[in-house]
Image (cartoon, rainbow, N blue to C red):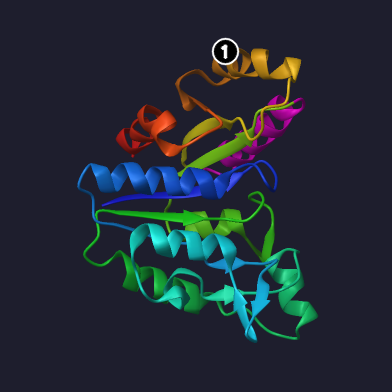
Amino acid sequence: MKKLFVTGTDTAVGKTYTVLGILNSAAGLGYKTVAMKPFETGCRICNQMLVPHDAALIKKAIGIGDLDAINPYRFVAPVAPYVAAKMKNKRIKLNVVFDTYKHLIKGHHLIVVEGAGGLLVPITRDFFYADLAKTLSLPILVVAANKLGVINHTLLTVSYIMKNKLKLAGVVLNDIDQKNDPAKKTNPKILKELLGNKFIGEIRFGRFEKNADLFKKILNLL
């Protein structure tokens, strides 16, 4: 089966949009898809229940009824999972995530796992998102917001992946807004020059259909 881990160079770079776009394209190609956001923080409270915004969008996209299977751990505080758990005096049990993952992949052609922030966001004291990708043998797609500073952020992330012998699926730039930033015009060309075929392309601001070719390209790389 095809599998992918989606990380970012920072928070709010468009990871969930990218995940949803990939799932949308995969479904259109006849894939039986599933996805997982194991940890979500910054959840809102509704009727005394924690509502994970991103995981709820993923649930809607793949049509699976059990939100707990997509998102086993959720917290109110908008901080790293390790920090959020400490604030609530809770302990994250990694086996819960691993067992849920094994259950989800049965009978599917594609699984996409979404991280939070970047690869070195801590899940527990000694286990980071990079470790999650490595443990589950997931190739990593790096999503980076197209803005000033993204070259440094992207190269740092890619360097970590390569030095730690993780598998890099590729890098995509995401135009998360319509601001007139001069760096936006040069970033794609420079990242292509520095990363070669590991730079997949740029996600344009707008609906999934606008980026259908790029999402299909990501699927073809897996």
Who's the residue at 61% across and 66% down the image? 40
x, y (%) of residue 57? 48, 59
x, y (%) of residue 132? 53, 60
* 10 Å crowding of disc 1: few (<14), some (14-19), many (20+): few
x, y (%) of residue 9? 66, 41
Q: Is residue 211 magenta?
A: no
**Residue 126 appears in the picture as rendered:** no
* Range shown magenta: 148-165
Look at mark 1 in the image and give the residue it sits on.
193
Circle 1: residue type: Glu
Looking at the image, residue 102 lies above or below residue 212: below
Looking at the image, residue 169 lies above or below residue 15: above
Q: Is residue 147 left or right of residue 188?
A: right
Who's the residue at 65% across and 14% down the image? 185
Q: Is residue 23 left or right of residue 188?
A: left
Numbered disc 1: secondary structure: helix
Who's the residue at 41% across and 74% down the image? 100
Q: How many marks?
A: 1
